[in-house]
Image (cartoon, coloured by chain):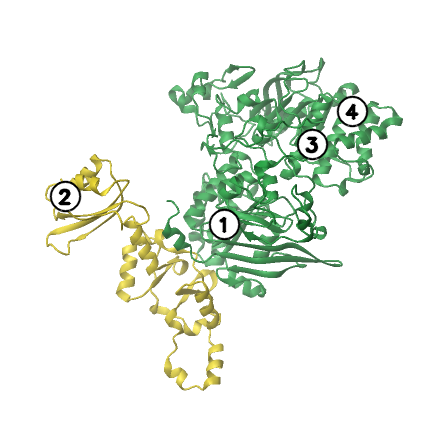
Amino acid sequence: MAETSTDSKRKGAPVLNIENLSVAYKVRGGEIEAVQDVSFDIYRGETHGIVGESGCGKSTVAWAIVNFLGANGYVKRGHIKFQGQDLVGRTGEELRRLRGDQIAMVYQDPMQALNPSLRLGDQMKEVLTVHRDMAEDEAEERSIQMLDRVYMPDPANVMKRYPHQISGGQQQRVVIAMALLNNPALLIMDEPTTALDVTVEAAVLDLIAELRRDFDTAIMYITHNLGVVARVSTRVGVMYAGEMVEKGTVEQLYENPQHPYSQGLMRCVPKLGADKASSILYPIRGRVPPPDSRPAGCVYGPRCDYIEERCRRERPKLRYLPNGVAVRCHFAEEIDPSQWRPSEDLELPTVGREDGPGQTILEVKDLKKYYEVQGGSLRDMVGVADKRYVKAVENATFKVDKGRTLGVVGESGCGKSTLIKTIIGLEDTTSGEAVFMGFDVTDDISTRDEKLIQELQMVFQNPDSTMNPSYSVGRQIARPMERFKTVPKKEIRGEVIKLLRAMRLGENYYNRLPRQLSGGEKQRVGIARALASKPDLVLCDEPVSALDVSVQAAILNLLLGVQHEFNTTLIFIAHDLSVVRFFSDDVAVMYLGQIMEIGPADAIYAPPYHPYTEALLSAVPIPDPKVEQKHIRLEGSVPSAIDPPSGCRFHTRCPRRQLLPDGGKICEEELPPWREIGDGHRIFCHIPEETLRTFDPVISTENIPVTKQSQPLKQGS
Amino acid sequence: MLVNDCMTRHPILISPETPASEAQKIMSENNIRHLPVTGAGKRLEGLITRQSFALAPDVLASLDVWDITRYLSGLNVKNIMLSGDKIYTITPQKTVERAARVMNEHKIGCLPVIEDGSVVVGIITESDLLDALQEMLGMPEKGVRVTMRMPDRPGEFAKLSEALGEHMMGVIGIGTYPSRRREGYWDVVLKIRKVSCPEVDAVLSKIPDQEIIDLRDVV
């Protein structure tokens, strides 16, 4: 039903009303105001999104509501009114009574919320038996109903299992079901889907939207992902450095962001709808200031492109514009984002290299990687049982040309990382061929020639765990140079500094230790180290997944710039399909160890699709509420790779199987053929090309206005 | 429509130990007239209405001005709330008409909606019922409102719906009741969207034995 007059009347008073909230932490030598002057309301049946980069105080607001600030944190000013009653300044006992069981929280990591040593059923029943004095068997029945409600397959059975026996997406569903058992008036969700795969995330987001309607719950949804917010929220608040800098409806924010920070955020997320050339990312320079060193005037001033004298002097107030949007900026009316130009010092990569395919640098043919599984039975121990294998990579065939980028996408556990680990030699291959510049690379790294190792380098997802914490940055980067003797000893220091400069990191970083760097800076060092030996092929395993959007944009642009400068070839793994499109020349889509579709990036994102690619694309949250996306949801979870489904591995979840005669019987029985679509685009599917071509595009971009960016892009250095 | 569909979920609740003055403040600040009183696990213990604050004159008459202040400040929600069999409740799976009847019969303005014996899951008030009436008659959307009078015998409504179906007219609100003016007849109120009065008149006036007794596009 549309928003009608009765609806708005029914809303009544807000469930949660936060007014001028400031939260401070007492620390040595004073106190730090982590959150300042935040105000917003949440009404029944409404999802209010809170977005911002990490360290902006989003979670602190949530913790203040449930009085979970820790011993040194307290609400310094302002009100938190829940159901008309102020929560600030009450004793613990009073709070417990006021809030009762009316506020529930769901956190990012479901395993933190579940007790690993108790059966799921017992944990769920406890909510009801303790809070509602319900009898055991009645609580059991109610829990099963609720699990069913969150679309948990086989709920009665799940009740008997332990948390580790179900998948991450299912764990999060259990947590959501548990939160809803008490029928809370307010549900606080702190990044609930961040740790999940896109397909699972899409299903959980659908679920949240549905539950909100059914239970009329007010939801506060915290996330850093602009796409997710666009999908679930009705209204959004953008937080920056502890302040709410803009709030309004989702449509207002995405169509016409008023605050320079909101505009900057929009510019640094890749948009799946737009074509590749216009999906340039413009990172915001600098980073979020820590709470103890925020600037005196506008907190965003140092990163703002429109900064004027007044911004340095005077802290802007949150004020309402005529269209109802609240914004914290002196010049919101005067700023026209369509007139925005990247500033001179912003590094932008060149796009649309038209040099055509170069010489093939890596050729992989029928590559297989099986892991043997140790069985527990006596027959296994004696060694007479049939050996069982996890088929992590099955018949991977592709080639990469010099200077190009191959993107590899797929859900977690689909073998993306195993594939590149095999190529780099951290794992040996089970069978198949892999030829890199004429060398065979199917063997283990220990048997490889040093020269070969030098040509193949890797950038990891988590720079923290791959850097020696006690080595200085300079030493980390110098090591490969010393080892491979690519640079004469005397020149190493100069060379390292040159690399640091290429990473926009300046000489003063040479002596720093990893702990003195931010996440983005660490990743830059990680990239510098990978490039130190002047490799021909760099394998990147989710290099930007752990970073904030503005930093992510900078790193991606940097990688593109580096690739252009050194003519490096890249294999780029990511689970974010929009990032891969922006970044890659070719894309391979993997499912359960099998490459399902491979081809030029633009061909992958338009029909004909493999049904799996289609489902993945329809699951990607797009940061634009106007984009229409086809609604395809995969059922169930990825099957085990120990015993993959016969025939086509995707047949158990394929939504398009019915297009084939006999309900797709052939998919269960036979391996599909590779269908050559042309231009190197291949699809591994039984469905004939003509039928695949008839699919509508997943993302219809008809309503999207073309972004006004007519000026030629600055060439990257 | 069931109580579940038109009740207000997550009503503001209050505990019995709260001072009466605070309850009064919550009600006026949030512009509500009823406040369910709950204990642990949202179990219903009582109900506060606007009348709860009207103290019996004989109690106050015996006190002097200073005693009144002390008396009022010591007053808790549990001293003034309705409780026990003075509260009528309903469950979410009952129909709205049943809720209306209970409220009408007992001349009360609200029913706490309870589950599992006494756990409060919502509240249904007169305004919720008035909202439901508007919705059932298609009030929120624009359209033509027509009242048809038809004889009380089977098959008459079918004639009407046939005529509507033939001309692809979409009904968004409907209500029937025995005609007040003519014995043996029923009046049917329909709200039809995306049509004009003359169009509706042309189609429905042709139905034999039935007449249009009211036709308007401004409700």
Mark 1: few/some/many CA within 10 Å (<14, 14-19, 20+): few
Label 2 sits on residue: B156
Q: Nearer the viewer, mark 2 or mark 3?
A: 3
Front-most of residues A14 and A212: A14
Label 3 sits on residue: A347
> According to the colouring, which chain is green?
A
Task: Pick out the residue farthest to the right.
Answer: A490
Q: Up-down: is A143 above or below B84? A: above
Q: Chain of mark 1?
A: A
Q: CA distance from mark 1 to mark 3?
A: 36 Å
Q: Amino acid at mark 2?
A: Glu
Q: Taking the image as drawn, is residue B95 in sight?
A: no
Q: Chain of mark 2?
A: B
* Helix, strand or loop for disc 2: helix
> According to the colouring, which chain is yellow?
B
Q: Earlier in the sequence, mark 1 or mark 4?
A: 1
Q: Amino acid at mark 1?
A: Gly
In this image, A395 relative to A538: left or right?
left
In the image, what residue occupies the spot 46% across and 22% down? Answer: A668
Q: Chain of mark 4?
A: A
Label 4 sits on residue: A533
Q: CA distance from mark 1 to mark 4?
A: 55 Å
Q: Nearer the viewer, mark 3 or mark 4?
A: 3
Q: Do dots 1 and 4 share one subunit?
A: yes
* Tag 2 and tag 3, C-beta contact below 8 Å: no
Q: Mark number for residue B167?
A: none
